[in-house]
């Protein structure tokens, strides 16, 4: 196993990642309790989870170490709770390279293998350095505010901080639903206020998986194939 | 058909009033910021999934500085370089950050090997 495991891992339950993966260690088996919306707060349509992961530089990302690096930071169900957490997280511009911040609907793990994701895909927006913090905030606000108008299709969004660029991905449930993916693309263009030259690409998680072997074999053979959902 | 005497009298005595002003909107930027919103978000009942809680960006941004949003969240792990340990690294456009009571004890040492 790799050395760059952070110390919070000791707070988590034992490493028995040979199992089929259903939720993280944090979410193992039993669903987490409902997030309470206090009087006076503005409820969101969904409860969300805020995740962080960081890949050790120079290491290939595998399913296992991807899973291990995923850390659940917070869950929120109201506008006020969101701001409380968001304001205490560093913005993408301040994060070290190879960091990922994931905001996913509660119960959906930011992995291809999650049942909500396995037939899905993602829009990928590559941003030149300097745009990420603003675009990411606009992205989150549009998602939390239900601006995409695609029913339950949105699973979550990721900002990936990389060396020469930053990448925003928006994951949805059904990759084959071109009406939905088209709507997501159009909303993204509108809310991110992207430069006209920005290239957007849709990729199914299935295609991403084909670059590796099957998900379950990955979980049993750590350290071998590379994961491409990490985008370099 | 014809108005009642009372109504006719009211019309006769009414002060002239200006016709409600029409504002020409030429671009989306000129839209009032609270267009189509109601306090507490806008409910749309016609979306495929049924009623949904919709918030416009401007409304969400306003909420950023509400007192409830400023109260320190519980259980946010302090990770150097990721989440804020103290006020200095917290970004907020306006206002100040209240003291964080009973902060969870940070594990000493670096959580990650920083190699920037």
Image (tube, rainbow, N blue to C red):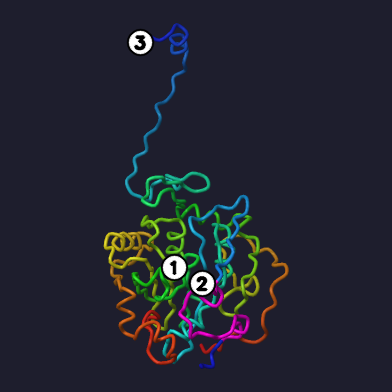
Q: Residues within 10 Å of mark 1 (few under 14, many from 20)?
A: many
Residue B62 lies, in percent from the top left, at 53, 54
Which mark identifies residue A91? 2
Q: Disc 3 vs disc 2: which is toward the camera?
A: 3
Check the residue under mark 1 and report the chain it is in.
Answer: A
> Label 3: which residue?
B1
Q: Are marks 1 and 2 in contact (CB under 8 Å)?
A: yes
> Which chain is home to disc 2?
A
Query: What SS does tag 1 mark?
Result: helix
Q: Main secondary structure of the magenta part?
A: loop
Q: Is residue A2 magenta?
A: no
Residue at which label 1 appears: A136
Q: Earlier in the sequence, mark 1 or mark 2?
A: 2
Residue A22 located within the stretch drawn in magenta? yes
Residue under the point 39% across and 52% down? B49
Q: Residue furthest top?
A: B5
Residue at the spot x=59%, y=81% of the render? A13
The Cα atoms of the two marked residues, 1 and 2, are separated by: 9 Å
For label 3, count other residues whose C-alpha is less than 10 Å away and answer few (under 14), some (14-19) or many (20+): few
**Which corner quadrant of the image does residue A152 belong to?**
bottom left
C-alpha separation, residue under disc 1 versus residue under disc 3: 60 Å
* Circle 1/circle 3 CB separation < 8 Å: no
Q: Which residues are magenta?
A: A6-29
Mark 3 on the same chain as mark 2: no
Residue A62 coordinates in the image, percent (x, y): 42, 87
Residue A125 at x, y = what percent? 35, 71
């Amino acid at each position: 196993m790799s050395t760059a495991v952070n110390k919070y891992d000791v707070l988590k339950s034992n490493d028995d990642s040979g199992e089929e993966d259903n939720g993280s260690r944090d979410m193992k088996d039993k669903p987490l309790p409902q997030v309470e919306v206090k009087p006076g707060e503005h409820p969101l349509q969904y409860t969300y989870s805020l995740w962080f992961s960081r890949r050790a530089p120079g290491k290939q990302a595998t399913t296992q170490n991807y899973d291990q690096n995923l850390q659940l930071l917070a869950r929120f169900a109201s506008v006020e709770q969101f701001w409380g957490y968001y304001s205490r997280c560093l913005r993408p511009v301040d994060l070290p390279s190879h960091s990922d911040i994931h905001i996913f609907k509660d119960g959906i793990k930011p992995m291809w293998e999650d049942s909500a994701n396995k037939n899905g895909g993602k829009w990928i927006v590559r941003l030149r350095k300097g745009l990420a913090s603003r675009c990411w905030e606009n992205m989150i606000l549009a998602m939390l505010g239900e601006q995409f108008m695609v029913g339950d299709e949105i699973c979550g969004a990721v900002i990936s901080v990389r060396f020469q660029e930053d990448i925003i991905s928006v994951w949805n449930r059904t990759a084959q639903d071109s009406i939905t993916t088209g709507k997501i693309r159009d909303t993204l263009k509108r809310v991110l206020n992207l430069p006209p030259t920005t290239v957007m690409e849709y990729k199914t998680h299935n295609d991403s998986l084909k670059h590796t072997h099957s998900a379950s074999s990955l979980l049993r053979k750590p350290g071998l194939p590379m994961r491409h959902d990490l985008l370099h | 058909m014809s108005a009642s005497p009372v109504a006719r009298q009211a019309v006769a005595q009414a002060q002239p009033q200006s016709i409600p002003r029409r504002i020409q909107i030429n671009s989306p930027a000129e839209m009032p910021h609270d267009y189509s919103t109601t306090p507490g978000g806008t409910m749309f009942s016609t979306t495929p999934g049924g009623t949904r809680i919709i918030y416009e960006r401007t409304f969400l941004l306003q909420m950023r500085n509400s007192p409830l949003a400023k109260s320190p969240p519980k259980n946010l792990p302090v990770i150097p370089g990721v989440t804020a340990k103290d006020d200095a690294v917290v970004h907020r456009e306006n206002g100040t950050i209240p003291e964080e009571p009973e902060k969870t004890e940070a594990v000493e040492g670096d959580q990650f090997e920083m190699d920037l």
